[in-house]
Amino acid sequence: MILNQVIVNIKTRENRFAYLIDGKVEKMYVQQPQYKTTVGNIYLGQVTKVIPGMNAAFVEIGEGKGAYLPREKMISFVRSEGTLEEKKKISVSSYIKQGERILVQVIKDAAGPKGAKITGIIEISGEHLVYMPYGRYVAVSKKIHSHTAQKELRNIGSRIKTDNEGIIFRTTAANCSEETLRLELEALRQEYKGLEQKARQKKIMLVHENDEFTKQLNILFKQMKEGEIIVDSLEERKNWQAMYPHLTVSFYQGSEDLFSYYHVEREIDKALKRVVWLPNGSYLIVDQAEAATIIDVNTGKYEGKHQLEQTVFQTNMLAAKEAARQIKLRDLSGIILIDFIDMKSEEEKKVMDILEKELQSDNRQSKVIGFTSLGILQLTRKKTMKSLSETLQSKCVICEGTGLVKSASSMAFQLERELWEYRNKDMELVEVIVSQDVYPLFMGGGNNHKKRLEEVLGFMIKMEIAEFPKPDYFIRMVK
């Protein structure tokens, strides 16, 4: 019997939960107050700039940076008549004006110098469906595999919505009656009308705040057919037991931190490391960069019991499963490239099938594109929030995130060049503070290089060793 557990740590300011299957962490979510996601938030914003060259506008929503609104996400664009190609030929200035106040929703958090990405097509989430007041289409969750059920839901959607409205049916909608769906739609309509009423105040404001942490937890609880929730809040234990009677909810009272007690803390540490070991001694290297994430597969200590091809195939199958797990665990997104060990094309298809199957349980939209001619598997995963690494780690102030600094020998040579600039100047002494690793390289064997340099430059060089976080030096005084 499979044991499903959700460990929820919410008694401190940093809120965390982990989803465990048979004791193995499959999903983690960490929310820190300063990095609380704005995805799903609805704002009354004001258009500050319309840029025809980008087919977009920037909207002030009160979060410090102008939010990016592409033309295709503007309500006026969606509601205008004509084919998509005809509408694209019209300037963005015809769809939106500077100074205009509009209701928008965040679909991607701000990152670095970029502001949030927003849409004018508002989505209000319910238990069985997502309501879009101006969506103008009906969609069904891809996780509903029955074509008959998909067709029936599309027919229901067409009957219960107006021409301007849009509906996305969730997986749970497959088991609902038309009346149940109609009642939920009406409730979501009323919720949207309440937001419109609030937005009539005509000032830039947050109209609706989305609690992503609670939302992700509720989605998980609803997906679990059975299992256990362990939480360090008595109040939430009572609430969740009433809301989810099919699950066992326990209150953790131990003195040891909840995540430490269930060994989740060490899993977080592992998820922040580059190297991920597989059970057979092979390993993955995960490198997150600005443009893409690269996962490299290595056989490592695994030699196999049979021929080389079988060893490679076994390693790649294990790597595909673990790569999918790491993608979900680390919340990796954007372009992801997996460099598997070279294998036959029919084996590539099997490995790709394993990866796609493992990603089916992912709540985030992903697309496995396929292998390149170089044997690299390409996939994309929708980015909405910060990854686990971006949430828990900050860029190194010494190397600025590159992992590299100038070597001790480079700094020794740089110091020498800088001292040459003082030659033929009226001075007797230069005092230099250097790091421990630069000192011997500059001094030379028996301090001979320093002595020769003093003779050529015509002044004394006084050296002092100090602690530096990297190979470095500082010219403190010139006399």
Image (cartoon, helix red, strand yellow):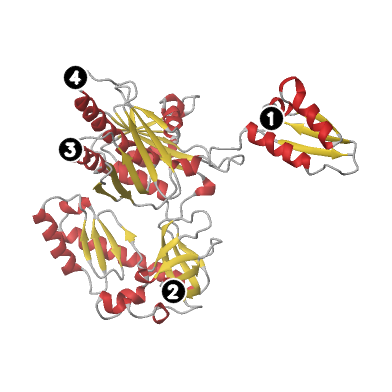
Q: Nearer the viewer, residue 234 or 227?
A: 227
Q: Nearer the viewer, residue 260 or 239?
A: 260
Q: Mark 4 falls on what kind of element?
A: loop
Q: Mark 2 falls on what kind of element?
A: helix
The three-letter code of the residue at mark 4 reads: His
The three-letter code of the residue at mark 1 reads: Val
- Foreground mark, 4 or 3, reads 4
C-alpha span from label 1 to label 3: 53 Å
Residue 438's disc is 1
- For marks 4 and 3, the one nearer the N-term is 4
In x, y percent, where is residue 288?
43, 42
Which residue has dot 3 on it? 350
The three-letter code of the residue at mark 2 reads: Gly
- For marks 4 and 1, the one nearer the N-term is 4
- For marks 1 and 3, the one nearer the N-term is 3
In x, y percent, where is residue 432?
79, 34
Which residue has dot 2 on it? 53
- Foreground mark, 1 or 3, reads 1
C-alpha span from label 4 to label 1: 51 Å
Q: Nearer the viewer, residue 154 or 391?
A: 391
Residue 391 visible in this rendered orientation of the protein:
yes
